[in-house]
Image (cartoon, rainbow, N blue to C red):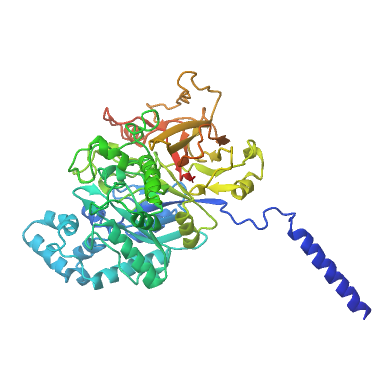
């Protein structure tokens, strides 16, 4: 009896103690559930399974090779050189074109799965005529005229797609490396780029149930979205799409009308944002964050722009196309559409990826293996044109970029969820680490406090999030914390880019320097911060980190805030200059550079925005 009474007393004491500490734990991390790790990956990579990659020389390197290389293994490139990443990736999407997926390779090795199809019979006829060029051209011809350039039957497509999905599963190691199933939908309208990357959250048990949607099925993005809806309804899985290279769409990527020429509607805006929460803003075919014509006051807007024509090289660029092609321009247009429709059709987070077609994902200036096998390192690389002399000069291609994802763990589920909520950012090839938050009551010295991250999440929203009606008299405050790539260049500065819709219905923008390295002072007349300088030695293609900062952080309040105006904000982090990959090539191979080729590069990061909506 006495013993029982003691036990009861201790039990009551324990319950009382438990109740007391539950309100305020001594261990402050207890109960936190926010992402604490950034994961680095490429959501856009092609192998020999892509018809264009195979036609242009990638005949050997497979999706399995791509996953192995991404995990840090050494691969022999098409030029015979050994190649390896300095640091492995955390995740990869092998996104081969869905049109004739795997078909060219299988046809050339005599696989009856392809040879026996109507397309295979047609291709054998081209070879019998001595016309292999027509076989190569069947890839694009099948989208322009699928009635006379036969797609594969569904049975063939399903079998090949099952192999693709199972390969991703074989290389998926939750917590260590994430291999996503995915493909590229290759819509091109009169040479204008409307391509999307499709990424699945699921394993092969769900992914393989339906074959990929292709440009042979339809070139209309709205039909792609319907196909994604069918996948989710059929399998219970999840999927999303990522547009890229609006800079090569000649105004169609973020157009003010639909594919069929109809005005945008609320339903269109809701559907687009349901399936396309992200935009690939930088890659090998140019950087599409900003353009100097659209942002004349932004001295960093002219960065690796590809702005001459479209992806088919069929039509020269006209100035009125530009606002509908670049990330910042589209984000501004989205504010106006939201006021008109009640929904923003261009409310996207920003990522980078490579669009490499040689199976190896490389973004570093001193370890860049180009886009196609023909653009891999060699003494002739500067003389040649990308894609066997049919596209652009190789020196123009960009060593870009990365998709950086803030997630709770390195798994398909957590990375995919982070992409959907837009807690992601882009870099142009460096592993710059950056966090960006918006809120109403962040203390001015918050970034100096060790527990700043707890407060940032508790009292605001991370990149990709939304701020609503401002408290009376308050302007939003933004936290930005950036650190250099440990193996890369120091940081020059951190900027915040603001876009807004003013009371007169005009779309405006401004770039603010919020924190920078050194003791520079903005010019009293222009407000511009002087350049950071350069340590680049062009003769040796080297640089030092004798200037710049290893990390930069600030809490910034918008000095021009109007609570009645819709706005977005994102951070741009700039490195100090270093030698561009083309300069490194010139020194390594002892070759001259074209006069037009940039000699240096300031790599950068672009966060996803935080939106303010009255």
Residue drawn 46% across the image and 26% down it: 535
* Rendered location of residue 577, percent (x, y): 43, 30
* Rendered location of residue 114, percent (x, y): 20, 68
- Relative placement, left or right, of 348 versus 515 is left
In which quarter of the view is residue 142 placed? Answer: bottom left
Q: Is residue 131 above or below residue 119?
A: above
Residue drawn 29% across the image and 52% down it: 195
Q: Is residue 343 above or below residue 547?
A: below
Q: Residue furthest right?
A: 2
- Relative placement, left or right, of 435 versus 191 is right
Q: Residue furthest top?
A: 525
Taking depth in this image into account, of 158 and 369 the one nearest to the observer is 158
Q: Is residue 251 above or below residue 89?
A: above
In which quarter of the view is residue 9 placed? Answer: bottom right
Q: Is residue 512 above or below residue 367?
A: above
Q: Residue furthest left?
A: 129
* Rendered location of residue 46, percent (x, y): 31, 54
In which quarter of the view is residue 300 placed? Answer: top left
Residue 324 visible to the viewer: yes
Q: How many marks can you see?
A: 0
Residue 400 visible to the viewer: no
Q: Residue furthest bottom?
A: 1
Quarter of the picture containing the N terminus is bottom right
């Amino acid at each position: 009896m006495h013993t029982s009474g003691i036990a009861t007393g201790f039990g009551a004491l324990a319950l009382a103690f438990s109740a007391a500490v539950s309100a305020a734990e001594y261990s402050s991390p207890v109960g936190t559930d926010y992402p604490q790790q950034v994961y680095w990956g490429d959501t856009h990579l092609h192998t020999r399974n892509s018809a264009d990659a195979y036609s242009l020389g990638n005949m050997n390197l497979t999706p399995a090779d791509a996953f192995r290389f991404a995990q840090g293994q050494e691969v022999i490139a098409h030029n015979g050189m050994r190649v390896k990443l300095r640091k492995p990736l955390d995740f990869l999407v092998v996104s081969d074109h869905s049109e004739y997926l795997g078909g060219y390779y299988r046809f050339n090795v005599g696989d009856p799965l392809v040879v026996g199809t109507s397309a295979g019979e047609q291709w054998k006829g081209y070879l019998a005529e001595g016309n292999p060029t027509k076989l190569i051209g069947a890839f694009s011809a099948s989208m322009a005229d699928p009635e006379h350039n036969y797609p594969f039957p569904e049975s063939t497509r399903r079998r090949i797609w099952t192999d693709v999905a199972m390969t991703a599963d074989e290389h998926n190691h939750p917590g260590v490396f994430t291999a996503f199933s995915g493909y590229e939908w290759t819509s091109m309208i009169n040479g204008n780029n409307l391509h999307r990357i499709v990424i699945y959250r699921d394993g092969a048990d769900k992914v393989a149930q339906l074959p990929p949607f292709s440009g042979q099925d339809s070139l209309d993005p709205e039909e792609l979205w319907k196909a994604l809806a069918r996948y989710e309804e059929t399998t219970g899985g999840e999927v999303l799409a990522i547009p890229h290279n609006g800079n090569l769409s000649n105004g169609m990527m973020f157009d003010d009308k639909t594919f069929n020429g109809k005005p945008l509607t609320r339903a269109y805006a809701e559907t687009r944002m349901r399936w396309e929460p992200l935009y690939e803003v930088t890659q090998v075919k140019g950087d599409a964050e900003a353009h100097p014509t659209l942002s004349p006051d932004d001295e960093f807007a002219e960065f690796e722009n590809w702005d001459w024509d479209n992806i088919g090289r069929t039509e020269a660029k006209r100035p009125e196309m530009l606002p509908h092609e670049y990330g910042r321009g589209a984000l501004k247009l989205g504010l106006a559409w939201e006021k008109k429709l009640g929904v923003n059709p261009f409310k996207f987070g920003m990522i980078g990826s490579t669009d490499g077609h040689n199976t190896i994902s490389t973004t570093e200036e001193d370890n860049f293996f180009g886009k196609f096998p023909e653009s891999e390192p060699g003494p002739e690389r500067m003389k040649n044109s990308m894609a066997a002399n049919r596209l652009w000069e190789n020196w123009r291609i960009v060593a870009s970029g990365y998709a950086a994802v803030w997630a709770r763990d390195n798994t398909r589920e957590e990375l995919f969820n982070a992409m959907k909520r837009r807690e992601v950012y882009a870099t142009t090839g460096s592993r710059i680490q950056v966090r960006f938050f918006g809120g109403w009551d962040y203390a001015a010295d918050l970034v100096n406090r060790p527990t700043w991250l707890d407060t940032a999440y508790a009292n605001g929203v991370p990149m990709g999030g939304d701020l609503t009606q401002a408290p009376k008299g308050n302007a939003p405050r933004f936290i930005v914390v950036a650190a250099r790539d440990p193996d890369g260049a120091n940081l020059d500065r951190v900027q915040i880019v603001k876009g807004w819709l003013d009371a007169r219905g005009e779309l405006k923008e401004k770039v603010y320097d919020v924190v920078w390295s050194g003791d520079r002072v903005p010019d009293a007349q222009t407000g511009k911060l002087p350049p950071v300088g350069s340590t680049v030695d062009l003769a040796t293609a080297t640089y030092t980190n004798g200037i710049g900062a290893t990390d930069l952080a600030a809490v910034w309040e918008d000095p021009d805030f109007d609570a009645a105006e819709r706005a977005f904000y994102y951070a741009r982090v700039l490195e100090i200059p270093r030698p561009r990959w083309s300069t490194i090539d010139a020194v390594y191979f002892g070759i001259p550079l074209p006069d037009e080729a940039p000699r240096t590069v300031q790599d950068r990061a672009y966060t996803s925005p935080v939106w303010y909506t009255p």
